[in-house]
Amino acid sequence: MALNLSQKQDVVAEVAEIAAKAHSLVAAEYAGTTVSQMTAMRKKARETGVYLKVVKNTLASRAVAGTEFEVVQDALTGPLLYAFSLEEPGAAGRLIKEAAKGNDKLKPRLVSVEGKLLPAEHVEVLASLPTREQALAMLARVLAEPATMFARAVKAIADKQGGGEAAPAEAAAEA
C-alpha cells in the first residue's frame, strides 16, 4: 500500500524523533523472515526498549538527516529493518543477534554508534556491551573493593599482632 505525502511526513517525523534520542542503530536485511518471527522480534523489542521499524530507505535517509546516524545514509540499500536502542546502546545489537540465531534470513547490514558507521560484524561487539544493571553492578564492585581490601588488611594485622578475637578471651581466662 502506497503512502500519501502526509503519511510519509508522519513516518519521517516519527523516525527522526526516535533517531534524535537513540543510542545506537542496527539495520538488518529481513527478506524471507516469517510473520511469526517478526511478531516475536517486535514483542522482544518492546520489552527491551528497542524501536523496531521497517521503513523505505528514502524515508529513513530523510529521518536520520541531522542526527548522529546521518553517516548511514549512503549505506541504506535493499529491504532493511531498523532497530534503534533507546534505553541502552547494546539492546538493538542483542535483539538482532538473538533473532538471527533462529532465522538465517535475518542478516545484520550495518551498525551505527556515536556518529560512526560500522560494519555488520560489530553487532557482536554491540551485543556484548553490558546492560545498565550489569554496568552498575560492576561499578559497585569496583567501588567496594578498596573497603574490602582495607578490612582484610586490618583483620590480618589484628590476627598477626594479637591473635585476633581469641587473645582477649585467653587474657580473661588467665586473670
Image (spheres, rainbow, N blue to C red):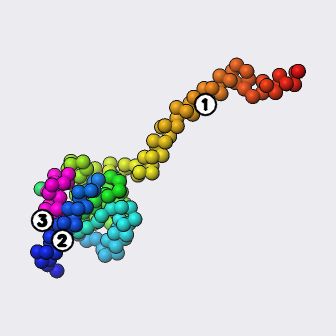
Residue holding disc 1: 151
The reply to whether the C-beta atoms of the residues labelled 1 and 3 are less than 8 Å apart is: no
Q: Quadrant of residue 154?
A: top right
Q: Amino acid at mark 2?
A: Asp
The kind of secondary structure element at disc 2 is helix
Q: CA distance from mark 1 to mark 2?
A: 60 Å
Mark 1 vs mark 3: which is more N-terminal?
Answer: 3
Q: Quadrant of residue 168?
A: top right
Whether residue 19 can be seen here: yes
Query: Residue 153 appears at what percent x and percent y?
Result: 60, 26
Q: Quadrant of the C terminus?
A: top right
- Where is 126 relative to 161, above or below? below
- Where is 92 relative to 142, above or below? below
Residue holding disc 3: 58
Range drawn in magenta? 57-73
Instruction: Decide: few, some or many residues near mark 1? Use Cα within 10 Å; few <14, some 14-19, many ≥20.
Output: few
Residue holding disc 2: 10
Mark 2 vs mark 3: which is more N-terminal?
Answer: 2
Q: Residue at x 27, y 54 (%)?
A: 24
Q: CA distance from mark 1 to mark 3?
A: 61 Å
